[in-house]
Image (cartoon, helix red, strand yellow):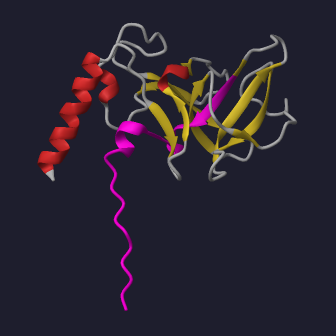
Amino acid sequence: MILRIILIYFCVIIKIITDNDVDFSLLCKKCGHQLTSVKHLTIKKSPYSLKSWNSSLLHSGFLKIQNDKYSYLNQKGLTMIQLLENPMGHRFEVANFVDANVRMLNETKSLSNTWFPNYKWTICLCPQCLMHIGWYFESIVDYGDYFFSLLVDNLIDDTFSEELVIQPKLKMY
């Protein structure tokens, strides 16, 4: 088992080093549906953020080997995560993306209690399992300016998911 993990580790490292167009998919943690990728990361700082910090979105940590062309990440392969709080006191850690494969809860967007001034919002769901995955924000000032704030706790990267093994349930008769 340890040999297998080491082999997987080195295979991924070799792929990262030799591949000029490195990209990591981010999946729904509940069902594994592909939602977005790290190439769609963007930085939108909320003035209502309780806290923000740089962190890797990849559980495996492989993002630390980076290519200079990824401007949304700093030199250590990190991106900005923000802690936001809704009016009911629920807190959410989010990362922002310019594109995501999500389902919007409804087409009506709200301006009330927005974390980003001049942006209206709606809730986003995973299109496969319908788990709450984040929010879609659309500018009321600049037509075509929009982004997705996705819940970091509900995302898993594809390099990490490939290491997961689900054992079949055995029926005891």
* Extent of the magenta region: 147-173
Which residue sits at x=37%, y=69%? 168
Tell me where residue 146 appears, x and y as whole percent. Answer: 72, 20
Residue that extends furthest to the right in the rendered view of this protein: 108
Q: Residue at x 72, y 28 (%)?
A: 115
At 61% across and 42% down in the image, what residue appears? Answer: 91
Q: Residue at x 59, y 30 (%)?
A: 50
140 relative to 102, above or below: above
Depth order, front residue of 94/31: 31
Quadrant assignment, res 99: top right
Q: Is 127 left, or right, of 65 in this rendering?
A: right
Residue 101 position, x and y percent, is 63, 34
| Residue 150: x %, y % from top left | 60, 35
Horizontal relation, residue 148 to residue 169: left or right: right
> Split into 4 quadrants, where in the image is the C terminus?
bottom left
Please tell me how many numbered marks the rendered image carries.
0
Q: In front here: 63 or 48?
A: 63
Position of residue 169 relative to residue 162, above or below, is below
Is 123 one of the magenta-colored residues?
Answer: no
Q: 23 and 41: which one is in front?
A: 23
Farthest residue, direction bottom: 173
Q: Position of residue 96 (x, y in %)?
A: 59, 25
Question: Image quarter for residue 43?
Answer: top right
Left/right of residue 14 with respect to residue 97 in the rendered view: left
Is residue 171 highlighted in magenta? Answer: yes
Image-based side of 104 in relation to 60, left or right: right
Return the residue nearer the eye: 93 or 2: 2
Looking at the picture, does residue 49 appear above or below residue 43? Answer: below
